[in-house]
Amino acid sequence: MGVNRWSNSHPLDRIAIAMIVVLSLLIGGIIWSGDHTFPKVREFSWQDQQIGVEDSAFILTFNRAMDWQSVTENLKIQPPIPGKFSWSGRRLAYTLNQPIPYGQSFQVTLDQATAATRGDAEEAVKMQPFTGQFRSRDRTLVLLGIDGEENGRLVLHNLTQNTHQILTPATLTVLDFKADPTRNRILFTAIDRGNTNQDLFEQKLYAVSLASQEAQPQYRLLLENQDYQLLDFDITPNGEVLIVQQFSRRENEPISLWVLTDAAPPRRLKHNADGQFLITPDGQTLVISQNQGVAMVSLNGDAKSKPVDFWPKFDQILNFARDGSAALMAQNNPDSTRSLYLLSNQGQEKELLKIGGYLLDAEINPNTQTVYCLYTTFNRSQTANFDLHISAIELETGKQQRLITIPKQSSGTLSLAPDGSALLYEEVTVIDKPSQSVVLNSVGQTVSESHVWLYPLQETNAVFFKKTKPQKLLPGVQPLWLP
């Protein structure tokens, strides 16, 4: 007679077997009928973030596979930002076609999108409505003050929040400054205002923090001047490395370049460095203007490293495209004119401008389609022989359009907004007699009055440039947009 193992099993065993059978049936039913969880956005990479020009795409991560056509058709961004979609697995990426406009708040909404189905017989399940928020950085500039207590001091002006703050103490006279690309600090050179015998070669290098909300921001000394005279400096795009140009006080040495980091002792670059220099956008090399040409040297090599590249035709490096695809170089011509060239990273050259004056500055807009140039021309009809100009040059066609002319001004500053929306420049009055102002222009003249202007840029497909009316902002010199 056979043994009935079910009847002879322990009661707990029978319960366990029954539960396994029930669970198996439930799991099989779920698999057979499909996934009934409601699709939703699990993560939004820009949620409550402050976005800058280095941020080019956001990602939406879903809890299940989606019908991407329904997602792309229903995703809304307000205000609109042109871009393109791509997706992989459960992640959707939206890549901007141009830098995000600064000074705005944005909302991303997604409704009515559906999950992916296994076939026509399966009903599409609509997702839970999603709303996300983010904002772009404020439109902020830093300048050298000219009026009253601001004279010779760094001033931070926020156009978005309409705030105004003095950054440096009254005991220092600021000479030059640069914004850390990370937007956390301003690097500046200054001399002691109380020492009337001090000259410009007694400058020291400082940094003032922008991270705190204190009424008087914290600043600290980065580089002394006992052994060397500080001439110039630059900072890498990640904000971690400083390059300083110095002249030894104690030894009969040429002007030298030094690499400064927090992680290692100062390291000297053994290259002729008596001219202007700029760090490339990748932060790996340095381009140096020399009498014999323009050289590119590695920041990671030792003192015996040879130049990575050399261009004998040019004598000045002016700027780079943000993506490193091109550089702006200047050349002296045999007829005493100056030419501005675009040099691609493939070695192709294109002359953009030829003038009978001085090339002061030039910048390439974020989409690498337009160059803005600051330069002077000789004017024989005036006692002050130079006029200052700002022109736009379309790279594809070479078409030029003069945007601004300032009569009787031979020096100035040009700064292009990080989102490409506007230019900053100043209109300066200089005097040759004694003045209470401690601010000097690039040729050593005392600046008694100066106003910063904003020129809005309106680029269209139909017209190269639609000229707009400049806006007078505030007193000051050397205006610079924060990144």
Image (cartoon, rainbow, N blue to C red):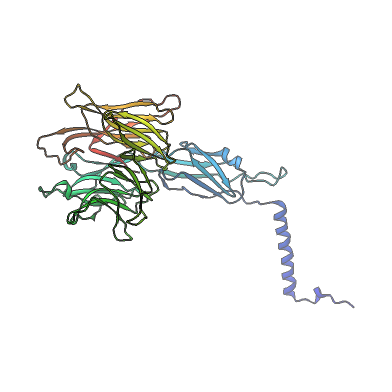
Left of 467 or right of it: where is 218? Answer: left
Any part of residue 158 in sight: no
Residue 281: give x, y in percent of width and height: 38, 46
Rendered-image quadrant of the C terminus: top left
Rendered-image quadrant of the N terminus: bottom right
- Tell me which corner region of the image, top left, top right, bottom left or bottom right, holds residue 472: top left
Any part of residue 343 in sight: yes
Residue 131: give x, y in percent of width and height: 50, 44
- Tell me which corner region of the image, top left, top right, bottom left or bottom right, holds residue 99: top left
Name the residue at 53% across, 45% down: 93
Residue 44: give x, y in percent of width and height: 50, 48
- Tell me which corner region of the image, top left, top right, bottom left or bottom right, holds residue 473: top left
| Position above or below: 323 against 228 | above
Q: Depth check: 429 or 260 in front?
A: 260
Residue 258: give x, y in percent of width and height: 28, 54
Left of 312 or right of it: where is 451? Answer: left
Of all residues, the one furthest to the right in this rendering is: 1
